[in-house]
Amino acid sequence: MQNYVMAIDQGTTSTRAILFDQQSNIIGIAQKELENYYPHPGWVEQNANDIWASTVGVMFEVLAKTGIKDTQIAAIGITNQRETTVVWDKESGQPIYFAIVWQSRQSDSYCEAFKAQGLEEMIKEKTGLLLDPYFSASKIRFILDHVAGAQERAERGELLFGTMDTWLLWKLSQGAKHMSDVSNASRTMLMNLKTLDYDEELLKLWNIPRCMLPEIHDTSEVYGYTSGLFDHPIPIAALVGDQQAALFGQTCFNPGEAKNTYGTGTFMLMNIGKEVKLSENGLVTTIAWGLDGEVNYALEGSVFVAGAAIQWLRDELKVIDSSEDSEYMANKVSDTHGCYVVPAFTGLGAPHWDQYARGTIVGITRGVNKYHIIRATLESIAYQVNDVLNAMKADSGINLAALKVDGGASANNFLMQTQADIINAPVNRPCCVETTAMGAAYLAGLAVGYWSSKEEVRHNWSIDQKFYPSITEETREQKIKGWNKAVKYSYGWAKDE
Ligand code: ADP
């Protein structure tokens, strides 16, 4: 009897294996932290062999902890940090360079050069993405340029590229499968959103040989089987980018449904259905998933500094002892006393896109105390999310019925209530906030018939708490007006005069 589905959540800070039962209960979790390397300012790298070792480690650990046998696992679903790039030797299986992490800026100059050539629009038109080193293409280019002989070896078919989904599938299947899914492939900047295949013009532009790229498949299907690890091969039945997995785990199956994840930064994704829609408001268009031969598209917008601003209150200002404390402290006062915090520590993303913006606090009068600042910092998260949501509404023409939330900071009731007030729509927090792993488990379980349909899966999603808007329209307008004014003061600060 196969009672469980295993999700492997390969994240930036750790790798986890989570077992789910058919009612979506979590039966066991194992986790291993990963080391990040910062060889130069702005560069972030990881060791792909460590990522593989951590994956094997957590898979065995979660089985040992729970006493569950490999024969009881119906399928494995892999969800992963997106865009992180590894290139390895097909014969030896050894990476030829460290894995370049999504946050890393080391390939910035390639993107700048293409911008100078006016290629931004063409790239956006084909891929839905902004020309930024965040995505995989420039990272592959960097590796092929910085490892001696790599370009020639790649052209001879001796090297393979993968994001972490592809790397783990290849390792788990002992080199039998070199594949990726549409959600991950849509982050490479090499895939055409409409044809769902690598785009010849883009391959030429980046000078990346097609033979090193993984085959692109649906998100939910049996890709292959584990080989050599267990006595019984287990089907690997989903590969999916982490944010898209969370969208699925939140059961946002219909156009117009959206989720926001509150972590270090925030990630909002809205399902926009079966048609590509390019953003005119600074968002990216991406593939949510491929399921039953059809793809769903999504709009995506992120806020760079969200939970990180709470860490700043804790670690730099030292006005709170823990992130959780921020809620209690914010509730000590009834408003921010007219002050606004704009935590633009690393510039501002959608819809402002000002890399020169820097943090600022405005509206300080003699009565402003630390509680007001803490409250204003929490409110700044809600305002930033509202800005992204407004861009999404403008692009999609859809008015959101409710926002589903997850991530560490979604535990903060003050923040969630403020969010509902500012977006003027209910905020729904589910009982299970492990939505990323759950999404991967669902997609794998659906592929092997462990769950029969999306409707069955939707049944398992339940609300922990619903937050309703509770302020007047006038108050809302006034607050947002103040925020818009405050944000303008942060613009362009770091620019040389
Ligand atoms: P990530 O996946 O980006 O590491 P998590 O989802 O684990 O993030 O959330 C951690 C972030 O959320 C941290 O930045 C932390 O400061 C913030 N955070 C966690 N709990 C709370 C809370 N109760 N109130 C406000 N912020 C919180």
Image (cartoon, helix red, strand yellow):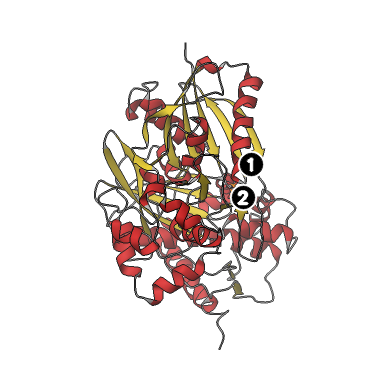
* 129 with respect to 329 (left or right): left
| Position above or below: 73 against 216 | above
Category of crowding for the residue at label 1, using alpha-carbon neighbours closer than 10 angstroms: few (below 14), some (14–19), many (at least 20): few
Q: Name the amino acid, label 1.
A: Asp
Q: Residue at x 39, y 37 (%)?
A: 251
Residue nearest the observer in this picture, 142 or 253: 142
- The location of residue 418, given as percent across then percent down, is 51, 55
Residue identifier under label 2: 46
Please state if 29 lies on the left or on the right of 255 as rendered: right
Assess whether mark 2 and mark 1 are in contact (beta carbons under 8 angstroms).
yes
Q: How many marks?
A: 2
Q: Amino acid at mark 2?
A: Gln
Q: Nearer the viewer, residue 318 or 118?
A: 118
| Residue 76 shows in this picture | yes
Q: Residue at x 34, y 30 (%)?
A: 454
From what the image shows, is residue 249 above or below residue 142? above
Label 1 CB sits under 8 Å from any ligand 1 atom:
no
Residue at the outermost top position: 1
